[in-house]
Image (cartoon, helix red, strand yellow):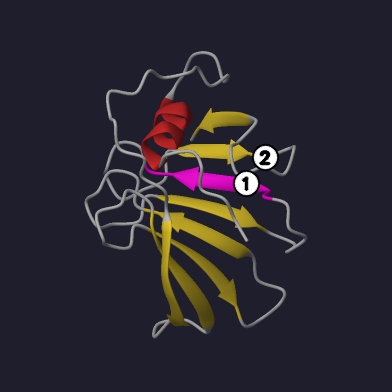
Amino acid sequence: GLNFAISASEVTKFLSSTKSRFAQPVASKQTSTCEGKELGSERLSDEPAMATFFDLDCDGKADGLIVIPDDPSNAREVRIDTDGDRKINMFVFDNNRDGQWDESLADTDGDGKSDMHGFHEDGSIIPTRVERM
């Protein structure tokens, strides 16, 4: 199981930062205690894979999914809609399916193309290093 304890907006802000790559604590104005919720699993219709869908921002709609391809040589992925536009704009990959995250791609300017490449040297879902593409 994965724990989505960090909000997608914080991940996007971290990935798009060109300054320090260390996350800073953020004072929350919300009094809500939103916790991501699994919405269900199903086979994807456009690729040979199973997907588990998550509501990460407690709006009742899926904005994240874990994709596990049928072919064990293909990477396990997390796909996230970080800006609420109903389009996936962040991908995190476990390339060799060892339970450790290896890299990520993010579209931070909304043009439909990845512009940030994250490297996950410690295997966590948050990148340890990010480079603009």
Q: Nearer the viewer, residue 12 or 58?
A: 58
Q: Is residue 85 left or right of residue 3?
A: left
* Rendered image quadrant of residue 55: bottom left
Secondary structure under tag 2 reads loop
Tag 2: amino acid: His
Q: Residue furthest right?
A: 98
Tell me if residue 97 comes above or below residue 106 in the rendering. Answer: below
**Residue 14 coordinates in the image, percent (x, y):** 47, 28
- Circle 2 crowding by C-alpha within 10 Å: few under 14, some 14–19, many from 20: many
**Residue 63 coordinates in the image, percent (x, y):** 34, 57
Q: What residue is disc 1 on?
A: 103
Query: How many numbered marks have been drawn onto this rendered protein structure?
Result: 2
Q: What residue is disc 2 on?
A: 120
Separation (CA) of disc 1 from disc 2 = 5 Å
Tag 1: amino acid: Glu
Q: Is residue 99 magenta?
A: no
Q: Nearer the viewer, residue 80 or 35?
A: 35
Q: Are marks 1 and 2 in contact (CB under 8 Å)?
A: yes
At 28% across and 43% down in the image, what residue appears? 83
**Residue 109 coordinates in the image, percent (x, y):** 29, 36
Q: Nearer the viewer, residue 63 or 44?
A: 63
The magenta segment: 101-107
Q: Is residue 131 left or right of residue 29?
A: right
Secondary structure under tag 1 reads strand
At 44% across and 82% down in the image, what residue appears? 42
**Residue 115 coordinates in the image, percent (x, y):** 42, 38
* Rendered image quadrant of residue 123: top right
- Circle 1 crowding by C-alpha within 10 Å: few under 14, some 14–19, many from 20: many
At 48% across and 18% down in the image, what residue appears? 25
Q: Residue furthest top?
A: 19
Tell me if residue 34 comes above or below residue 71 in the rendering. Answer: above
Tell me if residue 23 comes above or below residue 109 in the rendering. Answer: above
